[in-house]
Amino acid sequence: MSPAPLLSAGTPAPDFALPSTPDQRVSLSSLRGQPVILAFYPADWSPVCGDQMALYNQVLPEFHRAGAQLLGISVDGAWCHAAFSEQRKLHFPLLADFEPKGEVARRYGAYRDADGICERALFVIDAQGDIAWSHLSPLGINPGADGILDALDRLSAKKGANA
């Protein structure tokens, strides 16, 4: 069975509720009304993932200026996320797509069955809950933040045009 293709712009974003800590969950539907950035990544302690999440932590004020909430998602567990987040001093939630393993990533077409990890995939979801932009990056390459910022700029321009 081949993996589902990465969900593309114009597709309604599948709702989910995932643990952000061992005793708290975040649902996508609870963030409706604002843009949401989903950053699926392979593993907490891999060097590229660490650099990618640290970059997003630095760019977080720009994401917030656009009114957007950033969520990191991998198949690592909530305790692993907590240790990684503390070590990297991250200021955004990391969600555990741990059990059933990769269920949310599969729904977004961002799961690597052969490796049992998430793809390095990015999504910007608009305030109505539709995917405005998506990007799949090779596992070994940090996709940076430019694509996310461009997608947020387009959402802001579209919102301004509709005001």
Image (cartoon, rainbow, N blue to C red):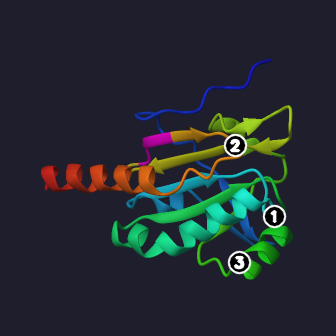
Q: Residue at x 42, y 64 (%)?
A: 68
Is 25 positioned to the left or the right of 29 in the image? right
SS of the residue under disc 1: loop
Residue range of the region highlighted in magenta in the rendering: 129-134
Q: Which residue is drawn at 63% across and 65% down?
A: 53
Residue type at mark 2?
Ala
Residue 112 falls within the magenta-colored stretch: no
Residue 133 falls within the magenta-colored stretch: yes
Residue type at mark 1?
Trp
Q: Mark 1 points at which residue?
A: 45
Q: Name the residue under label 2.
A: 105
Q: Distance between the residues labelled 1 and 2?
A: 19 Å
Q: Mark 3 points at which residue?
A: 88
Name the quadrant containing residue 72. Answer: bottom right
Residue type at mark 3?
Arg
Q: Quadrant of the N terminus?
A: top right
Q: Which residue is drawn at 69% across and 52% down?
A: 41
The answer to the question of whether label 3 and label 1 lie on touching residues, with beta carbons closer than 8 A, is no
Crowdedness of circle 1 by 10 Å Cα count: few (<14), some, many (20+)?
Answer: some
Crowdedness of circle 3 by 10 Å Cα count: few (<14), some, many (20+)?
Answer: some
Q: Quadrant of the C terminus?
A: bottom left
Is 70 positioned to the left or the right of 44 in the image? left
Q: Residue 100 got which mark?
A: none
Provide residue 2's location: percent of width, then percent of height.
75, 19
Q: Distance between the residues labelled 2 and 3?
A: 23 Å
Is 139 positioned to the left or the right of 75 in the image? left
Q: Is the magenta stretch mostly helix, strand or loop?
A: strand
Provide residue 23's location: percent of width, then percent of height.
78, 74
- Does residue 113 appear anywhere in the picture? yes
Provide residue 65's location: percent of width, then percent of height.
34, 72
- Does residue 26 appear anywhere in the picture? no
